[in-house]
Amino acid sequence: MKTFDGYRRPDGSIGVRNHVIVINTVGELSALTRKIANLTPGVIPVIHHGGVAQFPEDHTQTLRTLVGTAGHSNVSATLVVGTENDPIAQEIYKILKKKGKPVHTVCLNKNQKIPEILHEGRSWLLTALENSKKEVREQCDITELIVGLECGGSDAWSGITANPSIGAFSDMIIREGGTSVLAETTEAIGAEHILASNAINREVGREFLDIVRTYEHRIKQTGEDIRSANPTPGNMAGGLTTLEEKSLGCIKKGGGTPLKEVISYAGKPTEKGFVFMDTPGYDVESVCGLAAGGAQVVLFSTGKGSPTGSPIVPVIKIGTNPKVYEIMSEHIDINAGKIIDQNKSINDIGKEIFDKVITVSNGEKTAAENELNQEFAIWRLAESI
Amino acid sequence: MEVSYNALKLHPKDNVAVALKRISEGEIVFISNFESNLVALEEIPYGHKISLHVINENEEIKKYGECMGKATNEILVASHVHVHNVRGLNENERLEIINHVMEA
C-alpha cells in the first residue's frame, strides 16, 4: 500500500499542509484582513470579494466555499474576520468548532478601535502559529488523498500531452484506492456524451448531462452562446478549431476510469474513485471550488503558462509543450512536452506526476507555492443585490 | 533508419494529424501512425491539423477517434484543417450523439 506523510486532524481528515490562515466573510473586510496577515508573517491571507447581499443560491454557495476553505484539512488554524453580529462568521465558527479546528473570530464593531481589532487578531494568530509548529506529520494511506484535476490556458498540445498524462495519473491513484475530482463543466460541453456513457450507471450519466445542460442554459439566458466564446482567440491561434475539439482534449484528464459521482461546486465527494465537480472553466474559481470540496492537491495543465495557485492547496503545474516549460519554469513543475521531443510516453509522465503528488503531499513546495501564487475567487451564479 | 516525424496521427479512426513542427508548403510530411507520407498543400502551423484523406463537405472531422466538427467544404488531402473549413456541431447534431450513446 502506498503512503504519504500528512497531518491527521481531530475530525479524521488528512492534510498535506499545516497553514494558519486569516479569511474574510465579506469583501468589505479585504484590506483589514490583509493588514492582519501582514502583521503576522507566516499567516496566509485568504481574501474574497463577495458581499452579503446575494441571491439565495449564491449565499449558500459562498458559505459552503468559505466553510470548506476555513475548515480545510490543509489548514491548522483559522482566524475569521467578520462584521458585527456577522451570521457568516458565526456559522463558520460553529462548524469549525464542531470539527475541533482551532478558530477565532474578530469582528469590526462600533465598540472596538481598529488597532485593537488588529492586535487581537495578531495575538491569536501568533499563538496559533506556535501551536501549529508542534503538529507533526504521520504516515497516512494514499486512499486518503483527493486530487483535483484542472486545466487553464489550453493549447493544441493539452489534449495530446499533459491532459492524457493527468488521465493516466488519475487511473493510477484510483487503482490505489484514492480519489480524483475532474472539474470545469463548461470545458466538457461538446464531449459530455463520452463522460456520460462512461459513468458507472445511467443515473450518474444523467446527473452529469443535467449539470452540463443547466450550465449551458444559464449562459443562454444572458443572451450569450458558449460557442461564440470558445475556443478563445488564443486557443484558435494554438490550433484548436472547435469547442468539441477543446472539450475532447480537456476531458482526457479524467482518464479511463468510470465516473462514480457528480458533486456540486465546493461539495465534498462521498465516494472514493473518479468524481466530477460542477465548476466554471475560469481556473481561479474552479481551483477554489476543488479545494473547498476537500482536495488536498490540485493538478493543473497549462499550454500558455497560467500562473494560478491557491492559498490553501499546493497546485502542481504541468506544461503541455517544451517551450512553455522552458520559458515559464518558475510557474511549472512538470514538462509533459517531453512527449513531443524526448520520446516519453503518456504513462511515463503519468508516473512522474504520481511521484510528484507524493513528494508534494509529503511537504515539497510546488512552483506556485514558491512564487506565493495564492489566487482565491468564489464562483458567482447571479447578480449582486 | 530512424524516421523523424513532423506530424502525429492520434487515433486509428482519425482523418487529421497534428503538426509537431511548422510545416511549409511543399514540404514532405512524415506522419507517426500513418502508412504513407504526404506533401503539404499549404503551410501547417505548429500544433495545427493536416488532412490525411480527401474530406467531403459535411463529413465529420475525427480527432482522438471522436467527432470534433464537420467540414464546411471539400478539403483536399494534405490541407490545413481549421476554422476556415470546419464548423462545430449544431444543437440537433449534438443531441443526436448524446441520445445515441445514452440509449446504447
Image (spheres, coloured by chain):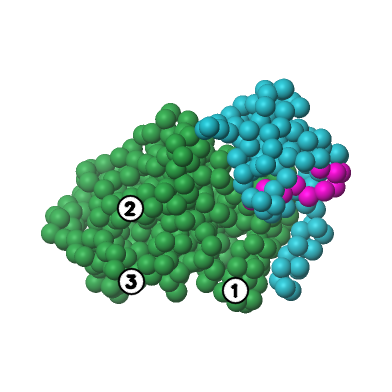
Chain colours: A green, B cyan
Q: Earlier in the sequence, mark 1 or mark 3?
A: 3
Residue type for callout 3 = Lys
Residue type for callout 1 = Val
Q: Which residue is mark 3?
A: A94
Q: Is residue A8 left or right of residue A34?
A: left
Of residues A338 and A226, the one nearer the viewer is: A338
Q: Earlier in the sequence, mark 1 or mark 2?
A: 1
Q: Earlier in the sequence, mark 3 or mark 2?
A: 3
Q: CA distance from mark 1 to mark 2?
A: 31 Å
**Residue at disc 2, secondary structure:** helix
User: Is disc 3 in the same subunit as disc 2?
Assistant: yes
**C-beta proximity under 8 Å, tags 1 and 2:** no
Seen in the picture, residue A64 relative to A245 is either above or below; the reply is below
Report the chain holding disc 3.
A
Q: Which residue is mark 1?
A: A204
Q: Quadrant of the C terminus of chain A?
A: bottom right
Q: Viewer-nearest of labels 1 and 2?
A: 2
Q: Which residue is mark 2?
A: A355
Q: CA distance from mark 1 to mark 3?
A: 33 Å
Local crowd size for mark 1, using a 10 Å CA cut-off: few (<14), some (14–19), many (≥20): some
Highlighted range, magenta: B55-64
